[in-house]
């Protein structure tokens, strides 16, 4: 026992690396598709026939086990002890290997084929993985100048032999962070902030909807929307498609009929879909009422997640896990930390350097343990250690007010009924209402966060109002706008819900900066979900119109003198959204209208021809700007 205790203490204070059996599972899909009931079923909880729509995102930590067929909720406070015990078990296994044999990797790292079956890695892949493993350790050798000066805290944990026993017994068990995303359209702009590049994705759809001829088109569009959204954020992450309400959709050959529709719509465009090879289907049918198919869904997610976590490039070091525990200890007294505080925590255990600390935070973010948004310097200074708290508070503003109601009696007692109606019916909110939903202590934090993520902007300074574009419900209907037109066509990729709203947010914020209220040429028109008419700069009036079904954003310019300027500004804004929130994977073509013929020509051709008024002067198109670390205010001022 003393030997084990010494080895445990030694492992805690070394910096060995190993796979970390923890993954993030993101459940997405159309509203009322049974996503929350699916989570309850996988947790072996009783089916609730009363539909409760998820507000924003619901996050649950759960443990899986090969010895039982259910998952159970868990909340770990000591990740380091478990990780140290895992390393000790691996080292014991390695020591038992005959030394005369050529040493091998600790694991055979399987990959998944399109059918979802594991495939053994080649020897070349294993050699490559071994080299990758050597490069990711956060050991002192990557800090040659600092490691001798930094005095590391000695890490201590209570030792019990059961830690070693459980580590051996739970070698292939997993801890999963389940993120159940609300299905209402109002949340989609916010969702793009939380979809991670790593993890397992589950797309849920209602089999009843896909079985019916009259509703199958819309149901397929939602599946397609999520497949394309996942490809933007996580092109290499596995996707499991799950059909719910199986028994209500049951009928002669209905499972095959649904499968044919899915195959015809999806084709072979998304190779990361894990197929249901047992039933020879593209999806996994299940029913939350009686548990039909749930075990297979659960086992499939476990297999996929385990394969993801044991990939060598996903291994982490002992010191990283200790770092995580020390960060999460602060959750008892705070919901978020500034980057300076996190640096101090890292310094105490020998992790130094902003870049290395940010890499650690990104790993923790990808696994669902905290939220760390790194697109701008302002966001990089915030580390949210309670993700559910963040989502819940953002969802107090971004929600469907007709479905997710606040306590109306309490709102009335505060004299904010009209403020609430204006927020959820017209997309405009007030400081008084924001202070009510967030509290005075956190109002400034959330205001700044929503500004930086383009979820909110100031409308007009003298009106003391804020626009929340994703809450806008009314759609602007118009046959034709007789003004010079520029079009951004996204058919190369697709136009995700929320991009237009973020562009709208930047236009309004830019106008507030550049145009004084008293100098406005005319009273600004209230915006619509798909339309904005605004004086962007003095004398520079434009209209934005989203054609979502056509995957286009149209820009109409009143005065030809600002045509060239309009392309420059809008291109820059699109690149900003693309870099900050779409991983630079959003693709589009720009077209401009020939004044004489009214034909649309590509912007590249217009530039070659020096087509007026679009190319009246040499203008930047936004692509050469350094957008990766520019805060929103600085970006808008630089336009």
Image (spheres, rainbow, N blue to C red):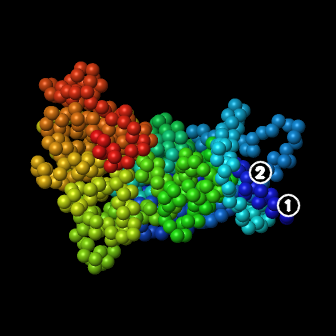
- Pointer 1: residues within 10 angstroms few (<14), some, or many (20+)? few
Q: Nearer the viewer, residue 431 or 339?
A: 339
Image point (59%, 53%), residue name: 23
Outermost residue toward the left? 522
Q: Nearer the viewer, residue 281 or 443?
A: 443
Relative height, residue 461 to residue 499 (above, below): below
Query: Where residue 498 sits: x, y (%)?
Result: 34, 49
Which numbered tag is attached to residue 103? none
Quickly name the residue at label 2: 90
Q: Is residue 76 left or right of residue 435?
A: right
- Pointer 2: residues within 10 angstroms few (<14), some, or many (20+)? some
Q: Is residue 69 visible?
A: no
Q: Is residue 356 visible?
A: yes
Q: CA distance from mark 1 to mark 2?
A: 16 Å
Query: Where residue 563 sits: x, y (%)?
Result: 19, 33
Relative height, residue 264 to residue 504 (above, below): above
Query: Where residue 611 sits: x, y (%)?
Result: 21, 24
Quickly name the residue at label 1: 3
Query: Where residue 293 sits: x, y (%)?
Result: 56, 56
Q: Nearer the viewer, residue 129 or 31?
A: 129
Q: Quadrant of the C terminus?
A: top left
Residue 10: which quarter of the image?
A: bottom right
Residue 492: which quarter of the image?
A: top left
Judged from the image, the secondary structure of the residue bearing numbered disc 2 is helix
Q: Quadrant of the N terminus?
A: bottom right
Image point (13%, 50%), residue name: 520
Q: Nearer the viewer, residue 310 or 51?
A: 310
Judged from the image, the secondary structure of the residue bearing numbered disc 1 is helix
Which marked residue is nearer to the observer: mark 1 or mark 2?
A: 1
Image point (55%, 57%), residue name: 342
Q: Is residue 26 left or right of residue 605?
A: right
């Amino acid at each position: 026992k003393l030997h084990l205790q010494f080895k445990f203490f030694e492992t805690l204070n070394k910096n060995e690396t190993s796979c970390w059996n923890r993954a993030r599972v993101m459940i997405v899909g159309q509203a009322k598709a049974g996503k929350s009931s699916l989570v309850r079923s996988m947790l072996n909880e009783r089916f609730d026939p009363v539909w409760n729509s998820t507000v924003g995102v619901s996050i649950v930590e759960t443990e899986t086990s090969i010895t039982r067929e259910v998952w159970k909720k868990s909340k770990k406070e000591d990740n380091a002890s478990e990780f140290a015990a895992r390393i000790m078990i691996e080292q014991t296994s390695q020591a038992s290997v005959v030394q005369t044999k050529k040493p091998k990797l600790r694991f055979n790292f399987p990959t998944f084929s399109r059918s979802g079956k594991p495939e053994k890695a080649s020897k070349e892949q294993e050699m490559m993985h071994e080299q990758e493993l050597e490069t990711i350790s956060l050991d002192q050798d990557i800090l040659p100048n600092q490691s001798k000066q930094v005095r590391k805290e000695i890490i201590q944990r209570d030792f019990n032999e059961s830690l070693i026993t459980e580590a051996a017994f739970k070698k292939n068990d997993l801890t999963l962070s389940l993120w159940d995303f609300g299905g209402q359209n109002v949340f989609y702009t916010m969702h793009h902030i939380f979809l991670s590049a790593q993890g397992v994705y589950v797309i849920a759809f209602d089999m009843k909807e896909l079985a019916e001829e009259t509703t199958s088109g819309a149901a397929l569009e939602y599946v397609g929307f999520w497949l394309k959204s996942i490809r933007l954020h996580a092109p290499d992450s596995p996707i499991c498609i799950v059909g719910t309400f199986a028994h209500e959709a049951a009928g002669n050959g209905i499972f095959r009929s649904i499968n044919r529709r899915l195959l015809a719509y999806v084709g072979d465009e998304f190779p990361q879909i894990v197929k249901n090879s047992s039933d020879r289907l593209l999806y996994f049918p299940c029913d939350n009422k009686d548990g039909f198919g749930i075990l297979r869904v659960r086992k499939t997610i476990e297999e996929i997640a385990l394969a993801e976590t044991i990939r060598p490039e996903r291994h982490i070091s002992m010191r990283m896990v200790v770092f995580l525990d020390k960060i999460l200890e602060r959750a008892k007294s705070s919901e978020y930390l500034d980057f300076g505080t996190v640096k101090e925590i890292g310094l105490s255990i020998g992790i130094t350097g902003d870049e290395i600390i940010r890499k650690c935070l990104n790993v923790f973010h990808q696994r669902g343990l905290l939220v760390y948004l790194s697109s701008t310097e302002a966001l990089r200074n915030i580390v949210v250690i309670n993700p559910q708290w963040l989502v819940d508070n953002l969802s107090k503003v971004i929600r469907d007010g007709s479905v997710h109601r606040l306590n109306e009696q309490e709102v009335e007692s505060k004299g904010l009924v009209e403020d609430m109606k204006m927020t959820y019916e017209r997309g405009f909110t007030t400081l008084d209402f924001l202070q009510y939903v967030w509290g005075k202590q956190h109002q400034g934090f959330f205001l700044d966060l929503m500004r930086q993520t383009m979820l909110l902007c100031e409308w007009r300074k003298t009106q003391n109002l804020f626009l929340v574009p994703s809450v806008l419900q009314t759609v602007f209907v118009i046959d034709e706008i007789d003004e010079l037109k520029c079009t951004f066509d996204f058919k190369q990729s697709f136009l995700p819900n929320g991009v237009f709203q973020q562009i709208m947010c930047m236009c309004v914020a830019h106008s507030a900066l550049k145009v004084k209220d008293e100098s406005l040429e005319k009273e600004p028109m209230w915006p619509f979900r798909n339309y904005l008419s605004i004086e962007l700069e003095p004398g520079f009036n434009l209209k934005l119109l989203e054609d979502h079904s056509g995957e286009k954003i149209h820009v109409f310019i009143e005065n030809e003198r600002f045509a060239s300027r309009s392309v420059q500004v809008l291109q820059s804004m699109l690149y900003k959204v693309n870099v900050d929130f779409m991983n630079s994977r959003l693709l589009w073509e720009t077209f401009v209208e020939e004044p004489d013929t009214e034909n649309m020509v590509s912007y590249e051709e217009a530039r070659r021809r020096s087509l007026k008024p679009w190319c009246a002067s040499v203008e930047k198109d936004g692509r050469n700007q350094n957008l990766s670390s520019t805060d929103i205010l600085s970006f808008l001022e630089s336009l």
